[in-house]
Image: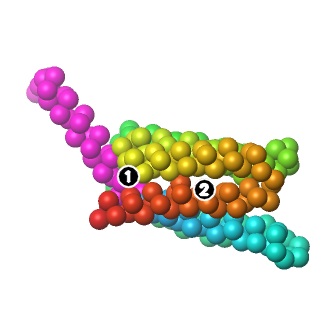
Amino acid sequence: MKDKALTHEESLNMITAMIRQAKSNYQKGGSFYFLLWGWVVMLANFAHYYFLSFTSFEHPYIAWLVTIPAGIGSAIYGARQKQQAGVTTPMERLYGHVWAAVGVGIILALMFMRQLDFNHSAVILLLAAIGTYISGQMLRFKPLVFGGVALLLASILAFNVPVVDQLLVGGIGILAGYLVPGYLLKNKEK
């Protein structure tokens, strides 16, 4: 039996439906990552800033250990989400690749923070801005686009303040760039 060729209109309708489904799939639960990482990174920034500025604690960077259980939780959630979704669309794969690239960039910034003269916070904010902006464009969700812009502005500011103040700027940038859009996206998911 021969497959019937699709008309131009049928092809367009199928593509539109696939895009709509992909958008729906990663909008459902997409807020989880912005909220989880928003809270974790914002609190770690503020805690590190507090320890560094107002205490004599020898290891203020210990605040960042909270990212380890967050990473494990994020991976478990992502694996379950992928298993429940079944089929992954090209749009979902692209979305995943964007954040994988951002993640690799962040890891490299952390690995080479000494060479960056410890200005890695500004670089990480820039990478987060790119990922958030692209996510907002892919989801056609303006608050994430604006979140990406907020993170970009925080990055620019962070490049121009002392390293200790970059932690404060980072926490505020994450609040504006991840948490506010994350809660708006969560409300849209309902």
| Horizontal and vertical percent position of residue 176 | 54, 57
Q: Amino acid at mark 1?
A: Tyr
Question: In the image shown, does 62 or 137 lie closer to the viewer?
Answer: 137
Q: Amino acid at mark 2?
A: Gly
Q: Residue at x 56, y 61 (%)?
A: 175
Q: Is residue 63 left or right of residue 76?
A: right
Residue 21 vertical position relative to residue 180 in the rendered view, above or below = above
Q: Is residue 35 left or right of residue 152?
A: left
Q: Secondary structure at mark 1?
A: helix
Rendered image: mark on residue 15: none
Q: Residue at x 81, y 53 (%)?
A: 162
Q: Is residue 75 visible?
A: no
* Sequence order check, earlier mark of 2 and 1: 1
Residue 99 vertical position relative to residue 169 in the rendered view, above or below = above
Q: Is 41 within the magenta?
A: no
Rendered image: mark on residue 173: 2
Residue 10 vertical position relative to residue 26 in the rendered view, above or below = above
Q: Which residue is mark 1?
A: 26
Quadrant (top left/top right/bottom left/bottom right) for the C terminus:
bottom left
Tell me where the magenta segment starts and ends, as one range.
1-30
